[in-house]
Image (spheres, rainbow, N blue to C red):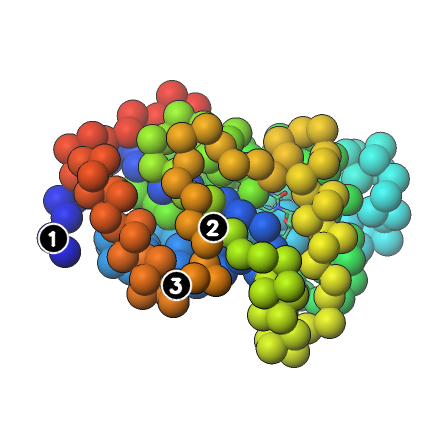
Amino acid sequence: MKMGKPKTSDTVVIAIDGPAASGKSTVARALAGRLGYRFLNSGDLYRAMTWACLQCKIDCHDIGAVASAAGQTQIEVGCDGSEYFPLIDSEDPRAHLRKEQVNANVSPVSAVPAVRYVVSAAIRAHATGRQTVIEGRDIGSAVFAETPYKFYIDAPAHVRQRRRRNQGQTEEIARRDLIDSTRETDPLTVAPGATVIDSSALDVTGVVAAMLAKLKEQGLSSAVYACSNG
Ligand code: C5P
């Protein structure tokens, strides 16, 4: 499929939200590759903030302590070839982001409004003036609510849990999903106007094809999204 490209200075955000293990990282990365866009996994920024709290021996359920740490920690997006990843006070935390302790604490840390504020600001700073596919929980509903390009990738809970097990992980993702979808600030939700795709019914190629068809229908090549969040 041939798709036109916006000018390189235009902000274009394709938001891909969904619960844990819905397959959104894989399809977001593949879609970005097809479009020649950057790919950003916003969950990695929340994981990085969680790692920073654990490094400082902060109780991740102490909202005041987590908020104070968020205010004192510099978070930004670094670049390594074509990979974009979080930097915490200029340090690369990638080796730690999938550890059990981070899995167990990332949802309570992400529920703290001060954390969401600094992470959302870092995401906006990175994406403004660029073309980016961003995956997360609140990209289409909050961080870039104005983008017309929104997807929500879903799959039944048992399918998602099986995917995690097949990746060799024992984490109970239902607990994270519950905290993420019931928190007060920017909970996981289907953003108004988002296209919902069940990834258990399609393979990666099928999901990406469905997304490209929707984007084409929306006239992505000409309907460039002007960012007002900057
Ligand atoms: O995408 P991933 O499962 O790695 O995200 C880890 C956690 O980060 C989520 O369970 C959620 O608590 C938080 N998160 C968030 N908002 C986002 C992305 C992730 O709250 N936009």
Q: Which residue is mark 1?
A: 2
> Is label 1 in contact with label 2 (beta carbons under 8 Å)?
no
Q: Quadrant of residue 111?
A: top right
What element does badge 3 sit on? loop
Horizontal and vertical percent position of residue 181: 67, 40
Q: Is residue 18 visible?
A: yes
From mark 3 to mark 1, how far is it between C-alphas? 22 Å
**Badge 2 is on which residue?**
153
Between discs 2 and 3, the one toward the N terminus: 2
Of the 4 image quadrants, the one containing the N terminus is: bottom left
**Residue at 20 percent of width and 39 percent of height:** 217
- Numbered disc 1: secondary structure: loop
Nearer-N-terminus badge (1/2): 1
Instruction: Report the mark closest to the observer, 3 or 1.
Output: 3
Q: Which residue does the image show at 13% across and 44% down from the upper left?
A: 4
Is residue 82 something one can see in this rendering?
Answer: no
Residue 42 is left or right of residue 35, and the answer is right
User: Which mark, by number, is residue 192?
Assistant: none
Q: Nearer the viewer, mark 1 or mark 2?
A: 2
Residue kind at label 2, given as amino acid type: Ile
Q: Which quadrant of the structure image shows residue 112?
A: top right
Q: Given contact means CB atoms under 8 Å apart, are the residues at marks 2 and 3 in contact? A: no
- Residue 208 in the image, given as x and y percentages of width and height: 32, 57
| Callout 1 amino acid | Lys
Which residue does the image show at 38% across and 21% down from the upper left? Answer: 228
Judged by depth in the image, the label closer to the viewer, 2 or 3, is: 3
Q: Nearer the viewer, residue 47 or 216?
A: 216
Disc on res. 202: 3
- Quadrant of residue 174 within the rendered picture: bottom right
